[in-house]
Image (cartoon, helix red, strand yellow):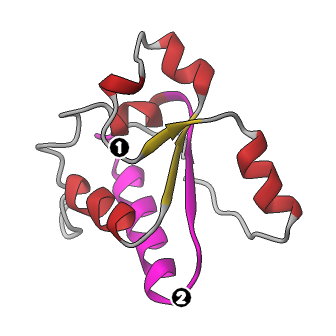
């Protein structure tokens, strides 16, 4: 995912990935560029792209159901963020974590 919290594609992406969890899939989200802002503490508190659920709730649902949420290290660093600036459950990891899943046969979607 590469779009920030106020872009409705962030809410769409989390709606779709939560649907995957509901369908029994294992899901991970790799955040790059502006999408890193989605997981900054407080960034989604007031974001709500109707008719979807509030973005904060979509993310909390994703994490509570076992979704993996990764943030791109250079993208985090470029914004001056550290681990403490991000919501609980986010791991700052490189793209190799995502590539390992793809090599093992994972399907991908981009938002």
* Residue 24's disc number: 2
Q: How many marks?
A: 2
Q: Position of residue 41 (x, y in %)?
A: 24, 32
* Nearer-N-terminus badge (1/2): 1
2 versus 19 height, above or below = above
Residue appearing at x 29%, y 67% in the figure: 61
Which of discs 1 and 2 lies nearer the camera? The answer is 2
Q: Position of residue 99 (x, y in %)?
A: 80, 50
The quarter of the displayed image where residue 62 is located: bottom left
Towards the viewer: 43 or 67: 67
Q: Are marks 1 and 2 in contact (CB under 8 Å)?
A: no
- Toward the bottom, the furthest residue is 23
58 versus 72 height, above or below = below
The quarter of the displayed image where residue 54 is located: bottom left
Towards the viewer: 58 or 87: 87
38 versus 100 height, above or below = above
- Toward the left, the furthest residue is 46
Residue appearing at x 58%, y 81% in the figure: 25
- Toward the right, the furthest residue is 103
Left or right position of 42 against 9: left
Q: Secondary structure at mark 1?
A: loop
Residue appearing at x 62%, y 55% in the figure: 110
Q: Position of residue 14 (x, y in %)?
A: 40, 62
Left or right position of 26 against 13: right
Q: Secondary structure at mark 2?
A: loop
Q: Give the alpha-carbon distance from disc 1 to disc 2, as whole Å.
A: 27 Å
* Residue 7's disc number: 1
What range is drawn magenta here?
Answer: 5-33
Towards the viewer: 13 or 92: 92
Residue appearing at x 34%, y 57% in the figure: 11
Q: Residues within 10 Å of mark 2 (few under 14, many from 20)?
A: few
* Residue 77's disc number: none
């Amino acid at each position: 995912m590469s779009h920030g919290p106020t872009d409705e594609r962030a809410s769409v992406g989390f709606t779709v990935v939560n649907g995957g969890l509901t369908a029994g899939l294992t899901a991970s989200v790799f955040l790059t560029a502006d999408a890193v802002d989605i997981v900054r503490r407080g960034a989604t508190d007031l974001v709500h792209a109707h008719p979807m659920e509030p973005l904060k709730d979509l993310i909390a649902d994703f994490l509570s159901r076992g979704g993996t949420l990764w943030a791109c290290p250079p993208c985090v660093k470029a914004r001056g963020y550290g681990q403490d600036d991000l919501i609980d459950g986010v791991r700052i990891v490189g793209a190799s974590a995502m590539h390992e899943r793809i090599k093992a046969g994972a399907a991908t979607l981009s938002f």
